[in-house]
RNA sequence: GCUCUGGUGGUGGAAUGGUAGACACGAGGGACUUAAAAUCCCUUGCCCGCAAGGGCGUGUGGGUUCAAGUCCCACCCGGAGUACCA
């Protein structure tokens, strides 16, 4: 019988679905294992061959774990909220829910054809109210909690209120936006609105004014990459930097735990490194520099905020952050960021105009421009001076935008000799440069002769008072100790990580379950709707664009106000600010829904809770997560934060959500080209015949009409009617195309759709081929040139079973089988699926050669194949007389008795060769080695008549024998 | 700039420090066939040689080792992340 995948595959897919073969229960005596894929955004283009790569790998692993006796959770769903559907809606008026539904249906159809073992009963969609109810719920919990740095834990905001009422901010160490200081009496004296404002400063989800790129013409906030030269990329409208009220998540509160948690997870070093860099922890010191102002002038706006709390002496000063406290003797100037609030009060009258001009200029510069002109040095002197607390020198204070407002305190001590940016600034403005670190204690030179600064944290301190001669590391510690002793600073840690802006002026996202309640003072207070009223469903709107007044699209919704008494959404016209209030108009960003979806899969139908304690108690966390590394600084940070918060709440049972993580590499496109002669527009020259590339124009050609780089000329004529009459200069009767690796995209005609390949070769071939392409983690171009080989292999594999199986003994076959079991098992654990496929090919060829049809060999082999090629395995399993599914078979166990035993220490290489090592005494000779080999050979029946082909003898008691 | 990755035939890629190039594609030759497709067999890193055989080979240069694609040092090239983060 022929191997007819077209008949076998749909038949088994149907059976599996009808019998619920992949349904997973939360109750089992078996050990649990959770294999998760990053769920896709269902785009209009459908799946291309890059998407299933990771899904196939994880499916193999999930099936393997199941065969090894685990209860495996392997779910799938859709990240269904997102921009493309909304943009499509703006253009066509088609509701995003409709497009999303269609795209999901298409994705599902494509996924089903590949034969995955997903439990579709657990599907989640982020746009489903039954799901986003819990996204909103989590947001409310974030709103209702603050982060206690002493306990290193999120705590209910009610505890904070209690504390304020009893002792004010006394002894409080909590994450906040602005440091605050007040007494219990002051707290009690505040009005409701004022108290809420204070609490907002501590909440983990908070509303704050944040600078954004605002484009009035487009009526929306733009990301930095959507703005060039102060104009919007689309339309070229002016963009301004504007402070806007935005919801943010205080993810920075978790910065240290996000760093620490990386120690506990089994991720690649490179991904951990990406996260560490993103969080950007740096240790250093905060130091207060006093201002050099007349003694009586101690009231300076801006300066007060920087007074050391523990220093009663009323000297106006400001705080800087440095990672190099050891270089404090080399400070020759100070720099404030243009946004610094001290600038106004310290600038001298002579400098005032210049400073104001500079600040205004810097303010109007877009983030983009600023980043593009990093090399250009700019700045201005304020006329004011600070005092170096250790040397008591007067130091000029400058303003420059190379100091960023968002990092540290927005002020630095500049040490031009040992910081390249300070160095460039000093050179540009002719400021002094003083060496305070040298590679050797006496290696001091004139910095005027330097071409660059010495930034390395190695060597010795020089010209540095009491730390001179110390190693840099010791000097750092000594300076910090001194500063702490003097009460003018302390050790501290800074992070590069910023809080996550959580508002989007978009329609197609989760609505915030918040309304704006007017209090007696007339101020609006952000107020959560009651938890039991969730979900707050996304309202219908007349238009998906922003409103004429610049409100987000939800401004078009009629029914979008909250009635406190009826506890429901009512028409906007009923807003009276007494019992009916306006609802929030922004929606949540894409990462909101994807931050906790893995937990919902554990208990997807629960309508009482996000997930039950029993479900999470059973599954714990994700054992294996497969997805792209491009999410390293986005989703994977947010999800870890989300999980840690739920852990603090006592809901998640593991602090880290994803124990092991595999990054599948991107599949790039492989474009094909034809070459048109520049002299003759109707002449195409085969690649090998081109003498000079300058004579031809390469033109993209659809990869679907090219086979192994050979062009199907007839189909080309049909595809491009304008070339119907074109002539082709052929080599060996064929037109050979050129190729190049590019992004997979429609415009380059290099998109490969998996359905076409499934129709042509079958799902099992596609699965094996995607694995055979190369290591899962590696980025690689898609290329169908080798798929024939895999297809041929499956036909041969089928043929092994074609005559039926017998109960014959086959010692040689068992040997091959057990080699295969060992290799495949090792490969799967290492996620090395490309070598697994090779192993199957070798095994099949060898069993085919010996015409092995022994059941004892062929039956376990089918089980080995089941994770990789489930359809053909299932079919053969049943043909061998089984009535249960191969998914519930038992993974065969490697038995070394069929290979090498006792004194012989393997590895055995499975290439039709064997190599093993025999240990000999240290003083053994070549003759001893040969003797040992023949003894070993004699004692081994499994060696048969084989004689060693080559014996490599080396001193030190080891010989290698090659058979 | 910094961090992380990788560099092996015509191609994709194999090699717990132990025969480098498994397996597959492509290419060349052959069998079967009226013919083609399909299938099967042989050859295929480079150089010298009719051959047996010999020499050279994992980006470059050093080193450790009986033995290095693999470990160490320096450099060159590609890919990714990040970027006035003090």
Image: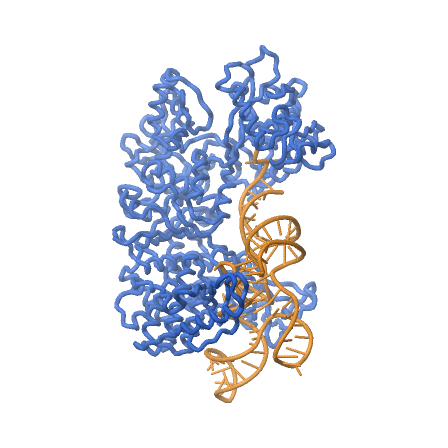
Chain colours: A blue, B orange
Outermost residue on the right side: it is A449
> Could you say where residue A684 lies in the image, as x and y percent from the top left?
63, 69
> Which is nearer the eye, A292 or A855?
A855
Residue A459: quadrant of the picture? top right
> Which is nearer the eye, A733 or A182?
A182
Residue A12 in view (yes/no): yes
Instruction: Establish if A362 lies above or below A383.
Output: below
Residue A795 in view (yes/no): no
Instruction: Establish if A232 lies above or below A693.
Output: above
Instruction: Establish if B8 lies above or below A28.
Output: below
Q: The N terminus of chain A is located in which quarter?
A: bottom left
> Which is nearer the eye, A766 or A248?
A766
Q: Is residue A253 left or right of residue A442?
A: left
Residue positioned 66% across, 34% down in the render: A440
> Could you say where residue A20 lies in the image, as x and y percent from the top left?
28, 59
Outermost residue on the top side: it is A296
Q: Is residue B8 left or right of residue A118?
A: right
> Which is nearer the eye, A493 or A537?
A493
> Could you say where residue A101 lies in the image, as x and y percent from the top left?
37, 52
Outermost residue on the front side: it is A923
Residue positioned 40% across, 20% down in the render: A170
Q: Is residue A166 left or right of residue A490?
A: left
Residue A351: quadrant of the picture? top right
> Could you say where residue B31 lies in the image, as x and y percent from the top left?
51, 86
Total marks shown come to 0
């Amino acid at each position: 019988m022929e191997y007819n995948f077209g008949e076998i595959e749909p038949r088994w897919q149907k059976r599996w679905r009808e019998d619920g073969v992949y349904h997973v229960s939360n109750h089992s005596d078996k050990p649990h294992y959770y294999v998760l894929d990053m769920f896709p955004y269902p785009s209009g283009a459908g799946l291309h061959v890059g998407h299933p790569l990771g899904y196939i790998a994880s499916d193999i692993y999930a099936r393997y774990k199941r065969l090894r006796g685990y209860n495996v959770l392997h779910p799938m769903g859709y990240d269904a909220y997102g921009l493309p559907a909304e943009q499509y809606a703006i253009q066509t008026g088609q509701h995003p829910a409709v497009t999303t539904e269609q795209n999901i249906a298409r994705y599902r159809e494509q996924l089903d054809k590949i034969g995955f073992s997903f439990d579709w009963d657990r599907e989640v969609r982020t746009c489903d109210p039954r799901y986003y109810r819990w996204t909103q719920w989590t947001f409310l919990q974030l709103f209702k909690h603050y982060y206690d740095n002493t306990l290193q834990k999120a705590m209910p905001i009610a505890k904070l209120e209690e504390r304020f009422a009893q002792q004010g901010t006394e002894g409080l160490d909590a994450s906040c936006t602005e440091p605050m200081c007040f007494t219990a009496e002051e707290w009690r004296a505040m009005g409701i609105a004022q108290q809420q404002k204070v609490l907002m400063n501590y909440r983990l989800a908070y509303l704050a004014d944040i600078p954004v790129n605002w484009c009035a013409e487009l009526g929306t906030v733009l990301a930095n990459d959507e703005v060039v030269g102060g104009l919007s990329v689309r339309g070229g409208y002016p963009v301004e930097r504007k402070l806007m009220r935005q919801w943010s998540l205080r993810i920075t509160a978790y910065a240290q735990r996000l760093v620490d948690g990386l120690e506990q997870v089994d991720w690649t070093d490179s991904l951990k490194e990406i996260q560490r860099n993103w969080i950007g922890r740096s240790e250093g010191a905060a130091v207060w520099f006093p201002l050099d102002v007349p003694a009586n002038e101690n009231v300076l706006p801006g300066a007060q905020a920087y007074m050391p709390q523990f220093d009663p002496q009323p000297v106006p000063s400001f705080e800087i952050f440095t990672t190099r406290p050891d270089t404090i003797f080399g400070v020759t100037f100070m720099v404030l960021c243009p946004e610094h609030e001290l600038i106004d009060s310290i600038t001298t009258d002579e400098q005032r105009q210049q400073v104001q001009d500079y600040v205004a200029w810097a303010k109007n510069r877009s983030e983009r421009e600023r980043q593009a002109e990093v090399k250009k040095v700019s700045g201005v002197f304020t006329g004011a001076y600070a005092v170096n607390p250790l040397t008591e020198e007067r130091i000029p204070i400058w303003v420059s935008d190379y100091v960023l407002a968002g990092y540290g305190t927005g002020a630095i001590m500049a040490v031009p000799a040992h910081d390249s940016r300070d160095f460039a600034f000093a050179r540009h403005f002719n400021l002094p440069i003083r060496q305070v670190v040298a590679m050797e204690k006496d290696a001091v030179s004139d910095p005027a002769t330097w071409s660059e600064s010495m930034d390395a944290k190695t060597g010795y301190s020089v010209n540095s008072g009491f730390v001179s001669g110390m190693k840099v590391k010791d000097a750092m510690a000594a300076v910090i100790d001194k500063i702490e002793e003097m009460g003018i600073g302390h050790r501290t840690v800074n992070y590069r990580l910023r809080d996550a802006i959580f508002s989007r002026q978009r329609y197609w996202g989760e609505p915030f379950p918040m309304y704006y309640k007017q209090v007696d003072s007339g101020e609006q207070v952000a107020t959560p709707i009651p938890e039991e009223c969730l979900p707050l469903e996304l309202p219908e709107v007349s238009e998906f664009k922003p409103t004429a007044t610049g409100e987000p699209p939800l401004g078009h919704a009629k029914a979008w106000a909250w009635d406190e008494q009826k506890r429901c959404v009512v028409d906007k016209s009923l807003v009276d600010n007494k019992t009916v209030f306006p609802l929030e108009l922004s929606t949540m960003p894409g990462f909101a829904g994807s931050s906790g979806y893995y937990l919902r899969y554990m208990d997807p139908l629960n309508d009482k809770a996000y997930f039950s304690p029993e479900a999470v108690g059973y599954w714990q966390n994700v054992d294996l997560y497969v997805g792209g590394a491009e999410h390293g600084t986005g989703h994977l940070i947010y999800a870890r934060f989300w999980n840690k918060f739920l852990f603090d709440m006592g809901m998640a049972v593991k602090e880290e959500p994803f124990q092991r993580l595999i990054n599948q590499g991107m599949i790039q496109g492989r474009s094909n080209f034809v070459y048109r002669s520049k002299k003759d527009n109707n002449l195409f020259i085969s690649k090998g015949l081109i003498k000079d590339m300058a004579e031809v124009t390469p033109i993209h050609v659809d990869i679907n009409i090219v086979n192994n780089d050979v062009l199907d000329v007839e189909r080309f004529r049909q595809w491009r009617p304008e070339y119907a009459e074109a002539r082709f200069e052929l080599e060996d009767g064929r037109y050979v195309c050129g190729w190049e690796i590019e992004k997979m995209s429609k415009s380059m005609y290099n998109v490969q759709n998996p359905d076409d390949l499934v129709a042509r070769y079958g799902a099992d071939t596609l699965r094996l081929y995607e694995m055979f392409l190369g290591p899962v983690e590696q980025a690689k171009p898609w290329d169908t040139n080798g798929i024939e080989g895999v297809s041929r292999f499956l036909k041969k594999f089928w043929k092994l079973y074609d005559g039926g199986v017998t109960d014959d003994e086959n010692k040689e076959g068992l040997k091959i089988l057990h080699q295969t079991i060992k290799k495949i098992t090792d490969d799967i654990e290492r996620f090395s699926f490309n070598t697994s496929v090779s192993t199957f090919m070798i095994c099949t060829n060898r069993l085919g050669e010996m015409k092995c049809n022994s059941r004892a060999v062929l039956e376990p082999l089918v089980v080995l194949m089941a994770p990789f090629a489930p359809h053909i395995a299932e079919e053969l399993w049943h043909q061998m007389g089984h009535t249960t599914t191969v998914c519930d078979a038992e993974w065969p166990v490697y038995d070394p008795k069929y290979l090498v035993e006792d004194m012989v220490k393997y590895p055995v290489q499975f290439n039709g060769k064997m190599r093993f090592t025999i240990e000999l005494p240290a003083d053994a000779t070549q003759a001893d080695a040969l003797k040992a080999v023949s003894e070993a050979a004699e004692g081994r029946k499994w060696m048969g008549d084989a004689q060693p082909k080559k014996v490599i003898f080396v001193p030190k008691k080891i010989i290698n024998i090659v058979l």
